[in-house]
Amino acid sequence: MSDLTVNWLSEIPAAYVRCRSLGHAWIEGGDMRFRLARGHVGRALTCERCQMVRVDLYDSNSMELIKRRYSRPLDYDKPKGLERPMGVEITAEFFARAATAKAADLPEVLKQLSLAQAA
C-alpha cells in the first residue's frame, strides 16, 4: 500500500474504518418501505455508523432484487488516484485505533474465550 493510501486511511473518520472493516450497520429509518409503479417495491436503509444510505428495488411478485444503489457520505470514498486498501489493511487500521480494553471491561464471552485459550 502506498504512503498516500496509508495516510488517507489513518485520517478518515473512525466510523468509516469500522464500516469498512465490519460491514455496515443497516437500520430502518422512518418510512423505509415504498411501492412503485410497474410492480416494484423498495426499501431504504441507513448505516447507523457512517450514515450511508442503501436503496433496494425488488420485483413485487418474485421479490427478486432488481437494483441496489448507495448514497455515500461526501468524504466516504477514497480520493481518485489512490489504490484501494485491502481488507487486512483496513482491519489493521481498525485495531490500531482501538483502545486497549481492561480485562474487567471485556464482555463475558471474551473473558471465557481468553481463559479457554490460556488453559
Image (spheres, rainbow, N blue to C red):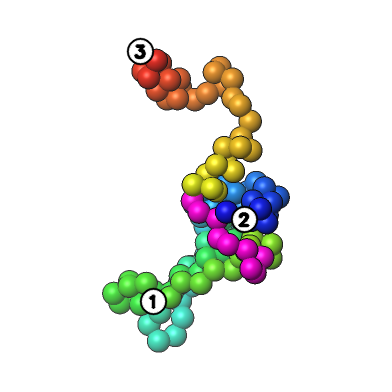
* Residue on which disc 3 sits: 119
CB of mark 3 within 8 Å of CB of mark 2?
Answer: no
Element marked by disc 2: loop
* Residue on which disc 2 sits: 2
At 69% from the left edge and 62% from the top edge, which residue is drawn? Answer: 75
Rounded to the nearest whole Å, what is the CA distance between mark 3 and mark 1?
51 Å
Give amino acid for label 2.
Answer: Ser
* Residue on which disc 1 sits: 66
In magenta, the rendered stretch is 79-87
Which of the two discs, 3 and 2, labels the residue nearer the N terminus? 2
- Quadrant housing the N terminus: bottom right
Mark linked to residue 27: none
At 66% from the left edge and 53% from the top edge, which residue is drawn? Answer: 3
Which of the two discs, 2 and 1, labels the residue nearer the N terminus? 2
Residue 51 in the image: state x and y as whole percent.
Answer: 62, 58
Q: In this view of the protein, can residue 12 be seen by the observer?
A: no
Rounded to the nearest whole Å, what is the CA distance between mark 3 and mark 2?
41 Å
Give amino acid for label 3.
Answer: Ala
